[in-house]
Amino acid sequence: MSPADWQIMVTAGLVATACGLLGPFLVLRRVALLGDAVSHAVLPGIVATFLLFETRAPLPVIGGAAVFAVLCVLLIDALRSTGLVKADAAIGLVFPALFSLGVLGVHQWTANLHLDLDATIYGEIAFVPLDPWIVAGIELPRAAWTMLAVVALDLALVVALWKELKLTSFDPEFARSVLISPRVLSRLLLVAVAITAVTAFESVGAILVVTLLIVPAATARLLTDRLWLTVALAVAVGWVAAIGGYATAVRFDASIAGAMGVVAAVCFTLAFAGRSLVLARKRTLQSAS
Amino acid sequence: MARHVLVSALLAIVVAGCGAASQANPNDGVVHVATTTNFITDLAHRIGGDRVDVEGLMGPGVDPHLYKASANDVSTLADAELVLYGGLELEGKMGDVLEKLDRRKPTVAVTRDMPRDRLRAEPGYEDRPDPHVWFDVDLWRSAARTTAEALVEVDPAGRATYKRNLRAYDRRLRTLDAEARERIATIPEGRRVLVTSHDAFHYFGARYDIDVVAIQGVSTATEATTADVERVAKLIADRGVRSVFVESSVPPQTIEAVLASARRQGATATVGGELFADAAGDDGTPEGTYEGMIRHNLDAIVEGLR
């Protein structure tokens, strides 16, 4: 294995960790598609960054994108908390509006430039090893370093607010009795998702992030009902997808993100089939007795 | 218990499929060159000859702006002794990566030495030139020189070969340039309009004196508006343009709308032959080379407009 191979797997694994830490809460709160929403909603941020600073450099682009990612999740949350609109509809209302705003911006001001999501914010995981940063004498891809920081942030959030997150995810009504208000907590979580998603898009591309936010969490939910184990398993399944997907991609000379997504889907299918078998057997036993 | 079995089954997937990637041998006496688009691959072959082993990342029909990497591209780039690419943001976000790669190994944009005053840019974006330089054959001679220089740098022992190949290829490019000029000049001047869906032909238009009208903008996030359709249809009718040139990258409905509107205004334009834009044709076909790609486009344009 060359250094490039393990650097790609570690970077994908770090993305899987960040997504696995947050994904279970999104699945529980039925806003799993938030990652997909954010992946489109960032376009106006990219256009604005270009108009203001004339640049497509990664850091300003991430900054501009993050502003609209946060705006997107907060708008979804606000719309949803009115009680007039359900969560799925709120997502479906907010992100197309922001994306359309971005398309208008591109058409109006930058139609003759290659300013689209692929050319600006969606990274390619294959090229991650070509952009190394040396920090404290350790050479890792820039994407791995930034994802490491995001993982630390997400981990701190999840550990510090574990009890509150657990209560509000399962029983928002009861949760009103805890210290931190469920609204504030929900917003903190959503902002963490927005920042995680934007950073991860820039590192490894959008589809992989959307996949890793949903599929490992959904897989873990089938395997356990305990929340801490769900989170741990979501991270683990994410790593399985990262390493197994990379091995598959190399063997077939295929798209790395695509192969990782397929392996994640295979994991889910296996867990789903296993869970169905277990349930079916339980029912047979019950009807027999 | 059943769940534990499931978890171990999932983990087993990791172990399966952990195969070893093949490694190129760096000591086999040839210079390993990695290239992006297939006409740069062709260029590296022409100048490098037998001294180089060229591996192109992008095949025929690939839009370099939207290229999606495959797993083996990582080792192709890692094993290469020289990387040649288009530059001027042709390769989109990958261009940023290649710029950084230059710190570790010779990574050269073949547009590097092109004179700034020959590069085209949209007003207001002078520092972001149009990257589609290859349709100005005379300008592409600069890419050939840059390629030869880059090869000499990594393989000084081959200097004589590279210089000889460059001289021979440069002659062919000069011939091709003159041929393009002559053939476009056979189209009556009033009808010398290249209506195309793509942004790739502005250098071609400037060099060979043919007006280029694009239906939609450069960014793939935009679509042609109804005003775009009307503007182009009116131009077709006004100038008696006989053919428009489309590419697979634009929705056929857009071009149909343009032609229908032009017909209402009394024009009889049809869809001309397909032009190569961001990539040459299939390997092993005449259009798979740079010269073949240019000649194919000349044939299609001259036949469609004359």
Image (spheres, rainbow, N blue to C red):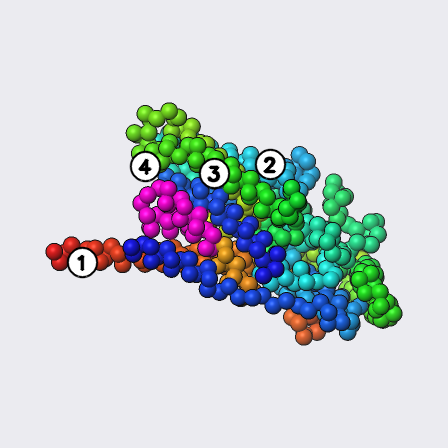
The residue nearer to you, when weighing A96 against A153, is: A153
Horizontal and vertical percent position of residue A253: 56, 65
Q: Label 1: how many residues lie within 10 Å, few (<14), some (14-19) or many (20+)?
A: few
Marks 4/2 in contact by CB < 8 Å: the verdict is no
Horizontal and vertical percent position of residue A160: 44, 32
Whether residue B156 is visible here, answered yes or no, is yes
Q: Which comes sooner in the sequence, label 4 or label 1?
A: 4
Amino acid type, residue under disc 1 in the picture: Thr
Amino acid type, residue under disc 4 in the picture: Phe
Cα distance in 3D space between marks 4 and 1: 30 Å
Cα distance in 3D space between marks 4 and 2: 33 Å
Marks 2/3 in contact by CB < 8 Å: the verdict is no
The residue nearer to you, when weighing B71 against B257, is: B71
Q: Which comes sooner in the sequence, label 1 or label 2?
A: 2
Cα distance in 3D space between marks 2 and 3: 22 Å
Q: Are marks 4 and 1 on the same chain?
A: yes
Q: Label 1 belongs to which residue?
A: A284
Q: Is residue B209 magenta?
A: no
Q: Are marks 1 and 2 on the same chain?
A: yes
Q: Label 4 belongs to which residue?
A: A170
Q: Label 2 belongs to which residue?
A: A63
Query: In this image, A8 relative to A27: left or right?
Result: right
- Type of secondary structure dominating the magenta stretch: helix
Give the secondary structure at mark 1.
helix
Q: Are marks 1 and 3 on the same chain?
A: yes
Q: Which comes sooner in the sequence, label 4 or label 2?
A: 2
Q: Label 3 belongs to which residue?
A: A155
Amino acid type, residue under disc 3 in the picture: Leu
**Residue at figure coordinates x 30%, y 29% from the top left:** A174
Whether residue B171 is visible here, answered yes or no, is no
Q: Which of label 1 and label 2 is nearer to you? A: 1
Q: Label 3: how many residues lie within 10 Å, few (<14), some (14-19) or many (20+)?
A: some
